[in-house]
Amino acid sequence: MMYHRGAEFAAIVEEVTGRLKHFFQTESDVFVITSSGTGGMEAAVVNTISPGDKVLAVSAGKFGDRFAEIAETHKAQVIRLNFPWGQAADPGVIADALRTDPDVRAVLVTHNETSTGVTHDLEAIARVVSTTDALLLVDAVSSLGALDLPVDAWGCDVVVTGSQKSWMVPPGLAMVSVSPGAWDAVARAQAPRFYFDFTAMRRSATRHFTPFTPAVSLFYGLQEALRLMWAEGRDNIIARHARVGAHTRAGVKALGLEILPDEAYASNTVTAVRVPEGITPQRLRQVMAEEYDVILAGGQDHLADLIVRIGHLGAVVEADIDDALEAMAKALRKLQK
Ligand SMILES: Cc1ncc(COP(=O)(O)O)c(C=O)c1O
């Protein structure tokens, strides 16, 4: 393995960070942390809040709930604003909640709720939050790099994504951006932190290093993936995901199946499909995996017996979706016999 305190590795960190800033559409700091996406979410929380701070946690699914749990773990006073799973968060309701509690210090939002296949209207939510003093912390684990998220233009303070999603790299890296407003909060925030301390990351970043031993091999992967993404171009990547998302939804409907969320806010990175009565999602996934080599995700929590999820982010084109849907059609026919 390359020495992680040498010039060769520093050059990788410098290149990767520069390209990530382009994809985050930010001039602010971006750090690559050796952890899964959840570690990045915890970093966002522990660096910006103090025990007892009021935090508004917007959730309409598994990952929105996780963000709330992290803030509760760190003793924030969490106001949970829940929307039904499969629906999008209503920015008007968020505005009302912030009017009711004007001392909210941070708003936690999921951009793309992977558990339900919903993309929340982050731009509208960010506009609401920008009229207050609250920070906006965004879980963009399954959106950034595939969906448009201009971090600076929308005024997002901490944005978190994960290597295994749009970035096409194995799991193990979280990437986070930190706005100037978030840095002000870091200076005040009293939540205990050591491994996830942004200040330590910033200090090391001046020399293009990481505070602790990084997952060096994953950095090589990220460097290569970002070169591929650079060659394709940010706008082209976003347009391809929009095309593939629409293609997936059309294909699912052509099979006579229903998509869980309203199409107005259906995600372009993951499609949640209702499984027809009489067939269990578990059995459908099993047949597709064993007989056709197509791996789908199941539903989480109360959606476990209702849906399967088709992931279409990263290196995915329409032909991949056609293969997956053909396998789904065959598996359904087999199970309906
Ligand atoms: C929206 C969202 N947030 C958070 C996570 C958690 O990321 P990780 O599993 O990398 O910790 C995921 C993982 O699928 C996700 O999709």
Image: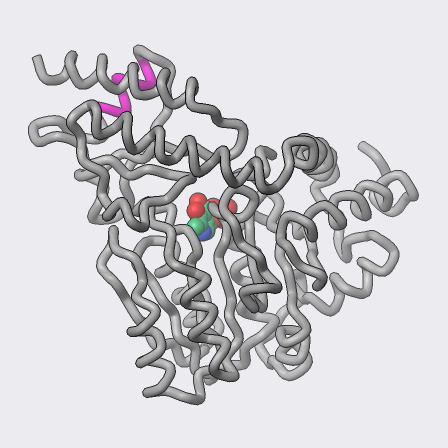
Residue placed most toward the observer, 206 or 2: 206
Examine the image and state in which quarter residue 263 appears: top left
Q: Which residues are magenta?
A: 283-290
Judge whether 309 appears above or below 301 on screen: above
**Of all residues shown, which one is farthest toward the right?**
7
Please state the horizontal and vertical placement of residue 131, each as a whole percent of the image: 47, 81
Residue displayed at 37% across by 59% down = 64
Query: Does 284 appear in magenta?
Result: yes
Q: Quadrant of the C terminus?
A: top left
Q: Is residue 271 left or right of residue 231?
A: left
Please state the horizontal and vertical placement of residue 166, each as a whole percent of the image: 54, 39
Residue displayed at 50% across by 80% down = 134
Please state the horizontal and vertical placement of residue 203, each as a whole percent of the image: 81, 65
Q: Is residue 100 left or right of residue 55?
A: left
Please state the horizontal and vertical placement of residue 175, each as a whole percent of the image: 62, 51
Q: Is residue 277 left or right of residue 32?
A: left
Examine the image and state in which quarter residue 111 appears: bottom left
Judge whether 292 appears above or below 227 on screen: above
